[in-house]
Amino acid sequence: MTEFGREYGDGLYALCAEEKIAQDVLIQLQTLKDAFRQNPDFIRLLSNMSLSKQERLSIVDHALRGQVHPYVLNFLKLLVERGAMHAFADCLAAYQEGYNADHQVIEAEVTTAQALSDDQRAKLMKKLSGMTGKDVVLKEKVDSSVLGGVLLQMDGKRYDNTVRSRLKNIQQTMAGE
């Protein structure tokens, strides 16, 4: 994460937390991130220095006024003014960290060979919540190369209980004999 992203994301979070709108703004920022990912040309347009600053600000204003909270709109305008739309993801990451810390939320990325069933997801979230004492937000990935089992990354740690990992360990053990 860049220093710029940390500073601006933390600043926006502090303002929203004080106003007690942090969760609503977080949802809007996450929605925007997804929209930007699906429409990268929009970010390129807002970063295009051949357009005047006023034109770029007008584009943001017309596209998002009434669609997002005024703080979000003004934040995006600030990024456009600074020529820093490329830092949006870093700003969101810093905002998310502040929110998670204040609300006892931990993110866990789980990778499985097949999508988790609702029952599996509920059991995993309950177990992780019990281990951490925090609310767990799962980010799920499906990767058939894990073959089976679960690869979990949480709180800077990696827990690998996949068939792929177990097979690799067996292979290393046999090669060492």
Image (cartoon, helix red, strand yellow):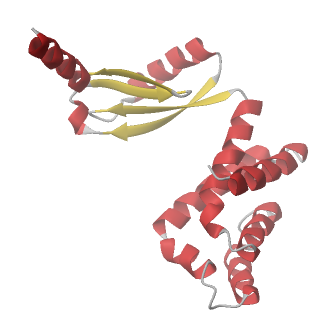
- Residue at image position (56%, 12%) is 131
Residue 5 in the image, given as x and y percentages of width and height: 69, 55
Residue 150 in the image, given as x and y percentages of width and height: 34, 24
Is 169 situated left or right of 138 in this image?
A: left
The residue lying toward the viewer, choosing from 44 and 116, is: 44
Is 96 situated left or right of 159 in this image?
A: right
- Residue at image position (68%, 83%) is 59
- The relative height of residue 30 versus residue 103 in the rendered view (above or below) is below
- Residue at image position (76%, 76%) is 81
- Residue at image position (51%, 23%) is 125
Residue 72 occupies which quadrant of the picture?
A: bottom right
Q: So how many labels did they put on this image?
A: 0
Q: In the displayed orientation, state which residue is furthest to the top.
A: 177
Q: In which quarter of the image is the C terminus?
A: top left
- The relative height of residue 39 versus residue 131 in the rendered view (above or below) is below
Residue 53 in the image, given as x and y percentages of width and height: 74, 85
The residue lying toward the viewer, choosing from 161 and 135, is: 161
Q: In the displayed orientation, state which residue is furthest to the front.
A: 176
Residue 52 occupies which quadrant of the picture?
A: bottom right
